[in-house]
Amino acid sequence: MTGLIRHFFSGSGRRQALIAAAVLAALTVAGCRGRKYDNPITKDTQQPDKVLYDKGIREIEKGRYEVARLTLNTLINTYDTSEYLAKAKLAIADSWMREGGSNGYAQAEAEYKDFILFYPTMEEAAEAQMKICDMQYKQMVKPDRDSIHMIRAEEECRVILTQFPNSRFAPQAAQKLREVQETISEGEYRIGVYYHQKGSLHSAANRLDNLTAHYPLFSKADDALLRLGDSYSRLAPRFRPQAIQAYQKLVREYPLSPLVDEAKKRLTGMEAEIPEADPVAFARMKYEQENATPRGFWGRNFGFLSSGPDVTMAAKSGQPAMTTLRPSLPVSVPAAAGQQGVSDVTAAPVPADTSALDTQPDARLNQPAPPSAEPAKTGQPEDAAKKDNGKKQSKKK
């Protein structure tokens, strides 16, 4: 194996790898261009809108996507009451998806969502949503990298199960969702393991507790529960109930795990009850073991070269989580750990402030003081007396 890797990274090995990649890319492009369209209309007619539709489909099959879109848009703008209007709009979205790339996928997603908005009752609406799920799924990367497409794929695949539960794409979407959640869980698991090995037990317990509660179908949930119980048991005596619950959950819900004996040993040492295995969980784990997908030669030896995640360990059965993973309250907060008493974190409304700062004018504005009222009062009698003296003098004259 070491010699094979050394040969791969040598000069000749690199050239061979580049040649193989170029041939694979050429075959992929040729396959997309020569592939027949999935949803053709077989109705034989010479109506002008049907002629335009057929021409657009032929252009898509030949890989001339821009010409196809121009032709189909001509159909939509010219024959606004055509029976092929919905099919033409769907074909435009398909052309963007076949073109590929980040720009092509973004345009295709926008077109598919428009199609679902205008034609929600058509059978093709579920197909359009499935293609949106597929596009986000294809853009996923490894668990330790950017998770934006994982989150988007989880959201879009979940839409099929909620809005189109009776469509023929529902089982396929459920499996895609399990694989997406396996990738998301792997990323959370690696972070939790890092904190556990580093000794940051509060952070490890926070990550692993949230992971095992939200994604029970994760292939390494048993190991996560064992590390979760170990983190709680090493934190403080007040976390002993949480440690016991983690070990008991491992024994009860993952009975075929090789870590069950270790969990039972720790429960015995803590003088805690050892629960019985759940029959439903036992049947599910047995089904998973019998239907596990083995990794091929390329995945075992060159999987590190792939940009996409490895989903061979994803569950094949069970209900996937129907909500998005949210950050949980850290276990270091007393309320999060189930402790009684007053938490260190409190919130209260701010009382109204009636101090002079709120009631008096701002001194920094240099506003002139208001005129006093007393001079006006003293001046009124004087003014009246002057008027009376003036009247008396005028009468004497």
Image (tube, helix red, strand yellow):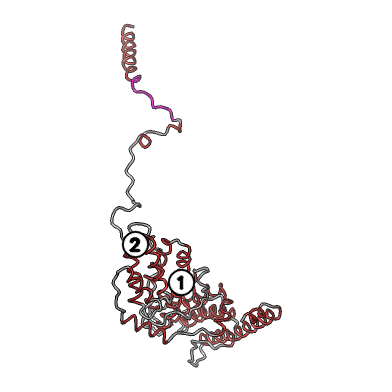
Q: Is residue 36 above or below residue 132?
A: below
Q: In which quarter of the image is the N terminus?
A: bottom right
Quadrant of the image occupied by residue 129: bottom left
Q: Which amino acid does label 2 sit on?
A: Phe
Of tags 2 and 1, the one toward the viewer is 2
Total marks placed: 2
Examine the structure image and report whether residue 264 is included in the region drawn in magenta: no
Residue that sits furthest to the bottom in the current view: 44
Residue flagged by tag 1: what amino acid is it?
Answer: Ile
In this rendering, would 374 be left or right of 118?
left
| x, y percent for residue 128 | 45, 79
Q: Is mark 2 on a helix, strand or loop?
A: helix
Instruction: Look at 47% across and 76% down and name the residue there.
Output: 132
Q: Which mark is residue 239?
A: 2
- Judged from the image, the secondary structure of the residue bearing numbered disc 1 is helix
Q: Which residue lies furthest to the front in this view?
A: 269
Residue 311 image point, x, y percent: 48, 79
Q: Give the range drawn in magenta.
A: 367-376
Residue 50: where, in percent of width, then height? 51, 87
Q: Distance between the residues labelled 2 and 1?
A: 27 Å
Determine which residue is flagged by label 1.
184
Question: Which label sits on residue 97?
Answer: none
Q: Is residue 371 magenta?
A: yes
- Image quadrant occupied by the C terminus: top left
Examine the image and state in which quarter residue 288 appears. Answer: bottom left
Residue located at (49% from left, 85% from top)? 294
Is the magenta region chiefly helix, strand or loop?
A: loop
Query: In this view of the protein, which residue sits in the foreground, 155 or 167?
Result: 155
Question: x%, y% of residue 313?
Answer: 46, 80
